[in-house]
Image: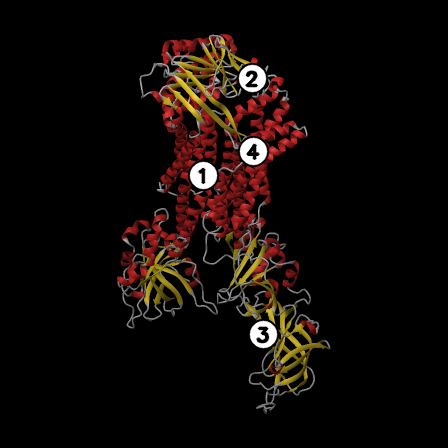
Amino acid sequence: MFLRMALRYRWSQALVLAGISLLIGACAAFAPWFARAVEQTVTTEALTHQWNSAAWQLKTIPSTAVRGPAESTPPEDLAQLVPADLKPLFTPPVYGRAAAVIWGRGNDRPTVQGRVVWRDGYCAQLELTAGRCPGGPGEVAASTADAKNFGLKIGTTLRAQTASDPTRSPLRVVGIYQADAEDAYWFGRRPIGNSRQASDSQPPLGDFLLTERDTLAGKALGAYSTLDTRPRPGSARADDLDRIRQATDQLEIQIAERGMDAQNSSGLISVIDSIQAERRQATTIIPLVMVQVALFGVVVLALALATVVDQRRPELAVSRLRGSGAGTTGRTLAVELGVPVLLGTVVGAVAGFAMLLTVRVAWLGGGAPLEMPWTVPAAVAVAALAGLTVVVLSVRTVVRRPISSLLRRIPLRGRHRTIGLIDLTVIVVASAGLVTGLTSGGRGPLPILTPTLLALAVGLAFAHLLLPAAGLVSRQALRSGRLGLALGALQVARRPAVTRLVAVVAVATGLASFAGQAASVGDRNRDTRAGYETGAEAVLAIDTANLGEFTAAADKVDPERRWLTPVVLTSPPSAESLRAVLIEPDSYQRIAFRGDRLTDADGFSKLRAPTDPKPIELTGQRMTVTADVSGVSPYEPPTDDGVIPAPEEPAKSVVLQATVVNQQSGGRYLVRFPPIPLGRGGPVTLSTVIGCEPSCLLLRLGVSREVGDVAGVRGQVAISRLTTDTQQIPLGKAENWKSGQQIEADQGGITATDGPNGLTLDVTSLGGELNLQHAAAPTPVPALVSPDAVGDSLTVPGFDGIAIPIAKLGNPRIPVPRHTDLVAVLDLETARRFGGGVDRASTEFELWLNADGLANVGKVMDGLKAAGVTPTLVDQRSDRIAGYGRSASALALQLTPIVGFASWALAVVVLLLMGVSSWRSRAQDYASLRINGVPAATTGGAARWEQTGPVVLAALLGSACGVIGAHIALPMFPLFAETTEPSPIPLDLAINWPVALILWLGGTVVLTATTLVLGTTVNRRAGYGRIREELS
Amino acid sequence: MSGLAISTSGLVHIYRSQGHDVAALSGIGIAVRPGEIVGLLGPSGAGKSTLLQLCGGLLTPSAGRLQIGEHTLTTMTEPELDRMRASDVGIVLQGAGRNLVPYLSPVNNVKYAQRAAAGDRSLPAPEEVLDLVGLTDHAHARLQSLTPGQIQLCAVAVGIATFPGLLLADEPTSQLDHAARDEVLAAISTINASTGMTVLLVTHDPEVAALLPRTVTIRDGRIASEGRSGEEFAVVATDGSLPLPPHVAELLAPGTLLRVTTTEDGDVRLRPVQQEDQA
């Protein structure tokens, strides 16, 4: 009956209660909705971006029957392996037939390895540059690359056979095609991009010869069937993943049960596992981030209700005076307060849905379906229940007091200050939660609640210390005549509501501070990881097989290395062995991500190729040397038992040799001079072909022997006047020539001493090769080696795959950007001096770009193409950052700014509520003081600072708790999706002090501005008429 | 409903203040007949309001007996006290605003006060109640628009909303000008006359006291004197003690010995004993 009037009279209070409940309801509804939407989004995006890994690629296994190939299962039969209930979730299967063949043109011997392929609907995927699509058996379409490489034309007849069956089948080219090999239709079975002509070491390869199904019917060419399908993003949802995983897992069993000879190559299980890991993060982090706001909202609601109910004490007293029992009175008030709480929660749920719609578009790209998971109504119901419970408890606590107590304007308090049971419980629970969170190994939900729990415990404890401290300050200020401070402090001391205020402000600023740290640290780590993984702002892969061509192109585009740095990666056949990352230290330091932190200045200095001595350059077709072997005589090394066996044949000659590196091709050659017979005294002039056009580097000088001449020799070989047909070659000092290997004395050896016009080689030869390497190419090569490499005798593959011994300078100070595992970082110039023909299979050429380079990437790529190399932009840091931004963890952390602002908003609401509910009695107090002669300026100061002082302290305390909480909790926070192997890239969890400072100042300004305005308003209303005011 | 009698005997109320027990009432014995109007007088802190609150069941006596009509308050439970306040005892607290729900009009305040008694018996129409205090014209006005006197009348109307047998009014005329004061007193007299309601009224105001047929003065938690029709009497307590009137007490230093004698015509004489007499 009186409910509407009551609500209308205190509409602002109802509005505040509804507003707080709205926030709680919004958090309650939004958290599960958003978590669900993120689950769906990560599912859809994983299936979209990893479509090839997620595909089922079924293939019948060609028979190994002795008497020719058996007819394989038709592809349509493979479709039975897709469970009927999953078919709507998968793309329509693409059936195919294929055969691995060796083909040749006309009557030529078949040499080109390739495939004859039919795929359902393939013609629609082709761009025919000539001819038509095959229309009958034996007709094929060849790629433009094959046409170019092997001279295929419309009408060309090919003959194809299999490796096991020499019978040749005729195929006629009726079309020349281009196709988009990246199109999802091909499921990674790339029709083009394989074609290449034969090289010295590799056979010719062909692209797909696309044909009609009939060409591969029956047993023809030993064809096998294929079926490609994949979960359809948008149709296959999070809830379907378990079924799909189970079906994928049991596919082998299904195949066996059906008696098929087939196999499935699919990475779907690992894709699903990674999705599930992200889903777990989403369903853990998001509710926990939001539940903090919701819980804080409940606490604020409780405080607001305590204030509201406290203000209703006179009305409760009136009701009790008129004979209503405590129960009836309580129920009436509970209904009055419960209505806005309930309405607010319901409207909050609607607001939560609106928020979902907004973030669905803004953050999730609209990819998540609109669903109503059961968790949403459950969470809203829990929120409503929590709100109503708080209402009932708040009312019950007050309404049960004796009427005489209800009649007092300010409730009686004990003489001795005590911590209330609820406050004590909160402090104990918060502290226990904190300890549990910190000792639970960093997993589970509690670490995320650390800042809130910490701020709550500290805020409440501080609040309870504040009251006696304020009393003390008041007395001291009064004694020293500072009336304004004394009054303000006294107001703090006599109003326990300030404890609520302090706790709320501490939690709010703590939450905001933590939110800022979580968001900024998360951002920083995503940026950092993306930087490490990319290596620089962007990476261009260069398609070349020539180091000289690669570096020349780089020099042409950016000779000053303002935009790019060249990086070459050489990989060994075994994944367990060290790879080499070859860099230009100077430009690498500037361009690579944190390249300057890879090592210190001394490390970089040691890494660089030596500048003294300079490499010895040769130009010309022939090399001539004057040698004198008169000092060399037969030598028989002693054996272990001291017996010297008689040589079968005496030593005949020694052979001078040199290793040169062609600077253009990078090829490393061994050139030998004619043998120098022993026993013939005096110098001889020898000449050999070196073919150093345009130029070579002289890498090694050495001595070998003729074939079969293995008898030992020892002595000095004097070499001088080393020339080419265009130049005199200075050999430099003997100390610049070093033996690369520690050879045992009884295995022979070679050293150099300075000689007249050249060098004198001290040789002990037992028939093998002996070399001295020029110090311009140091051996072993100094390298920074990643910590995961074990052993002392380390080598890395050179350009040609041949191992180069390395000397470990130490570990890099940071993970090596882009190539973090099992790598050694070497100087590119040093490696260049070693030379070696590039092994394309094991060598990758990259140009890393900085931000300026990326901004000019078009110009760079055009320049590189003009220089004769083909660049491809393969990686960008911004793409990786964006990718990480789509992870469940990042999406969840995007909520933290909302948490921060919501916390501030709640704190402001509490301040306003306290102001609204207490202004009258405070104004009456100040009016009384004014009547007694206290100046308005003094009461104004007291009114402003009685809340501002505690709020400033609480904001400082809360912000500190947020920072400490972040320091404790962030190491336990899953910033990235869990992986089976821990990432070598370290997390940078250092506190972001500028953000902490800004949030502290921001919170302090916002909250103190509110209290100052409220204080000023109270003082303005402290007129004399206020004292006689009765109706509240 | 006819008026209720009040009967107290040896009524004691002790409360705790700053760690000490303080006796607000020390063995009050008083009897009020049904339909009587009695004023409680006395200085601040004498125990008037405490006695009123004990009668209203707002406080629990520490000792003694307290009977309101058929209700023995010393043995009643809280729900029984609620029922008593709902039907039989109306209370008007000091400060008119404390008796009213601020967002309700006078008529709704009366209705609000009748809620708890609604099921027990037939109740007067709210308009009839307001008519008794002369607020019919303001029945639907906002409280904030009423004068202090009208607010006080409204508080009285709320106190008599169920036509209880006893009206307890604490300083109903304080902070009112003379006209408003007289208006309120007239209303209370009218109610008493028309309903037979017993009225126990606390006042500081001697002018108000002079208008009341019977007054009881309380001092230091005891009944100091009683006035009947303007004449003041000392009252012998149940334990035989006799508080002296202030003007007599002023003449006697604490510890003074008095010789009590009776005369043949029934007078009782008190004569201080001189020092030489003591010797």
Whether labels 1 and 4 share one chain:
yes
SS category of the residue bearing label 2: strand
Question: What residue is shown with label 4?
Answer: A1006
Find the distance from the CA under tag 2 to the CA under tag 4. 75 Å
Q: Residues within 10 Å of mark 3 (few under 14, many from 20)?
A: few
Q: Is residue A328 visible?
A: no
Q: Earlier in the sequence, mark 1 or mark 4?
A: 1
Q: Identify the mark at residue B178; answer none if there is no mark.
A: none
Residue type, label 3: Leu
Which subunit holds the residue at mark 1? A
Question: What residue is shown with label 2?
Answer: B258
Q: Residues within 10 Å of mark 4 (few under 14, many from 20)?
A: some
Q: Residues within 10 Å of mark 1 (few under 14, many from 20)?
A: many
Question: What residue is shown with label 1?
Answer: A294
SS category of the residue bearing label 4: helix
Which subunit holds the residue at mark 4? A
Question: What residue is shown with label 3?
Answer: A670
